[in-house]
Amino acid sequence: MKLKNIAATALAAAMAGTLLTSCSQPNLENLMPFSEYEENKYSSVVEGSALTLYVDINAKDGGDGSESAPFTSIQEAQAKIREIKSGDGLPAGGITVLVKDGEYKLDSAIVFTEEDSGTEECPITYVSETLNGAVLSGGLILSSKDFEPITAEEKARIIDSTAKDKIVRVDLTKYGLTETDWGKMYAYGSYNSGSKYDGGTGPNMSELFCDGDRMTLARYPNEGFVYTGEVLDCGEAREYYSDDSMDSRGEMTYNPDYDSLRNPRGGTAKLSDEIIERSTNWQTLDDVWTFGYMKWSWADASNPVKTIDVENKTITFAQASSYGISKGAHFYFFNVFEELDSEGEYYIDRVNGILYLYQPEDFDSAEIMMSCITDNVVSASNVSYLTLKGFGVCGTRNSGISMSGNNYVVDSCKVYNVRSAGIAASGTYVTVQNCEITKVGGTGIHINGGDPETLTPSNNLVYNNYIHDWAVVDRTYHSGVEIDGCGNLVSHNELATSPHQAIGWRGPNHIVEYNEIYDVCFETSDCGAIYGGRNMTSYGCIFRYNYIHDVGSGEAHAHGIYWDDGLSGQTAYGNIIVNATSYGFLIGGGRDNVVENNIVINLGDVPIVPPIFYDQRTRDETIYGSAWFDHDEELANGIKLENDIWTEAFPTYGDLIRYYNGYDGDVDDPMLSSNPANSSVKNNISYIMVRYGGTIDTDDCGHSYGADIGKFSVIENNPIFLYYIADFPGWHNENFTMKVDSKAKELCPDFEPIPFNEIGRVN
């Protein structure tokens, strides 16, 4: 983890051209550094409030909310504030609800509505006494004393003979739980988080945690994947690409009505002798599922198994994956009772309500939590002048905190061990700061607000958060920070450890700056630490002063910053990208893009990949007439090109000639939307140091551009240094501050120093 002691900085005054003329942003100067939490313990908040109410889970019932007689729940304090509001009205100076340390068990969400809002004169703050000391939990604590050894009949089903005596069971119905609480393994719909049309990956059932660690549904194999053989039938996929490995019948079972199907028919593929033999030990295939990357390494999918044909050595899935199946697709089986053979694996008999667990270390003294509620732990709608501060939030099959409204704050909360997102916040003038988001099934923080069509900014801020180990269930396209709307600022965050991307966005005029991003995209390919694509309505976004390092791993070929499939109107400057397994920048054919004054270091192994790759995929489709790239509704998202507000903010936008299927105009017109025009790639500096030996052909390690890019855009002065890194005296300590008398400056006199020591979280 990288944590820097720096003062919060104001926004840089320089904006790129006219890109942000319509978008004001919140100021960072007055934000409280994270370390002040422990120093102040919110005494200043309490002392400055007109009224303080107290909550203590361990207090006696019937309290009045005073310090000597606290309420026992947040809901009681909430009701008291409503009473005050409807009576004499809220007092000037604010109300603080001080919540004493302890675990606050919830059977359903804590719900705030407009009725619970404060005002500018009387903001309302709910605050934990100490940092994350008050824990809001939707989980049920199970006692290790309630577990007992499995029966002889159950032992006989376990494949691994050494595991039989280490598995214990507990009757969940003795805790008053029902199937609603532990979740049904239902087999309908589509579970492909790699698809923008689909939701999460797999069924939304209860999860199990021991001492804060997420346990694993019994699976085969315990680590890694198995692979499909020949594909006999790719199923009713939503889309397909010509590929001989798709379907040995020579047929593509693509169904254009896929999105309306409740149960798209699954495909069939061959399996190896080893997998077939293993499956003969499974007593039933009821509720046996698969998880994997069935077609593309950027699209995960969970599918229930329909049949395994031992004689013909095939598997048939109960439902289709969005993109079909490829030969060699990697996946694993899960929710298989007989595969309880590894520490921390569990299985729930969903008919009889029996939980089975391979005992983890220190099981007798472990805290065993099962997530039960299907609500968000905290749900707030249309609130304003409300702050949540310092809470621990955990134990739900949904999201931790979900809020909408304006002028509200989520500060210093720790959200962990939830099935879906950590924090989902929408509205205007929203701040999410100083939080830790970890071990969440999906997105870390989703921020949404502002109006893309009118370019009205949200003035939302995601600041100084530590987001790590996200997307542990839904493993693709669930970002550490996901941005929607217009005019959101994501600044000084640390994002680490995820199988897929760190930052994703849609909409115009967002700023992503001073963030440190690392150890991401370690399981997926054709992806980027910062990734967006196939969109003509995200103009004006700026990515600056981000430190992106250690992206991808092994065969996971990932890029630093990736503007995919025609994404246009983006600006990147002052970024430092170190040790990505593929390109530093991949620009997928878009236009009106600026990549200037960035540093790329040590990409890939051997052979070396280009630090910057700008292809012309969109133009090529124009020339060759196969218009998968079509600036129709998919790309424009309903915002008309003739929108006067947009054409004033982005002068080239209003003059674009829209490319479409059957276009017969001049394919060389720079204003044709599919041409990579009006872009600038210059004054970027790259350093290549081969990590594992080998030789470098300097002709092969240069930047790579489509043959026609130079005809439409400015590409100049992007030097590459081989076997040279002396411009960074502290590189061995991960300090990439460039020295003043650098060789890079000689070649690029206009290169501006990058404030490396200001990047990352503020302590």
Image (cartoon, rainbow, N blue to C red):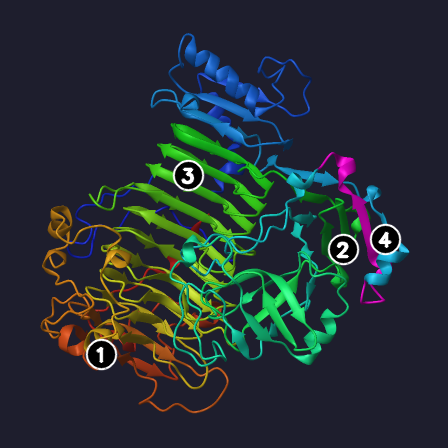
- Name the residue located 25 percent from the left edge and 56 percent from the top edge: 633
Image: magenta residue range:
158-177
Horizontal relation, residue 281 to residue 629: left or right: right
Residue 624 - label: 1
Secondary structure of the residue carrying tag 3 is: loop
**Where on the picture, by quarter, is residue 177?**
top right
Q: Earlier in the sequence, mark 2 or mark 4?
A: 4
Residue count near mark 2 (Cα–Cα under 10 Å), binned few <14, some 14–19, many ≥20: some
Marks 2 and 3, the one that precedes in the sequence? 3
Three-letter amino acid code at the position of disc 3: Met
Q: Is residue 241 visible?
A: yes
- Judge left or right: residue 571 versus residue 409: left
Query: Residue 600: percent from the left, percent from the top?
Result: 35, 72
Which label's residue is closer to the chain start, 1 or 2?
A: 2
In the picture as drawn, the residue positioned furthest to the top comes out as: 88
Residue wearing tag 4:
150
Q: In this view, does 167 lie above or below 94?
A: below
Q: Which of marks 1 and 3 is in front?
A: 1
What residue is disc 2 on? 360
Numbered label attached to residue 261:
none
Local crowd at mark 1 within 10 Å, few (<14), some, or many (≥20)?
few
Disc 2 marks which amino acid? Pro
Identify the residue at horizontal 22%, vertical 74% (top origin).
Answer: 748
> Identity of the amino acid at label 4?
Ile
Q: Position of residue 24 (x, y in %)?
A: 23, 43
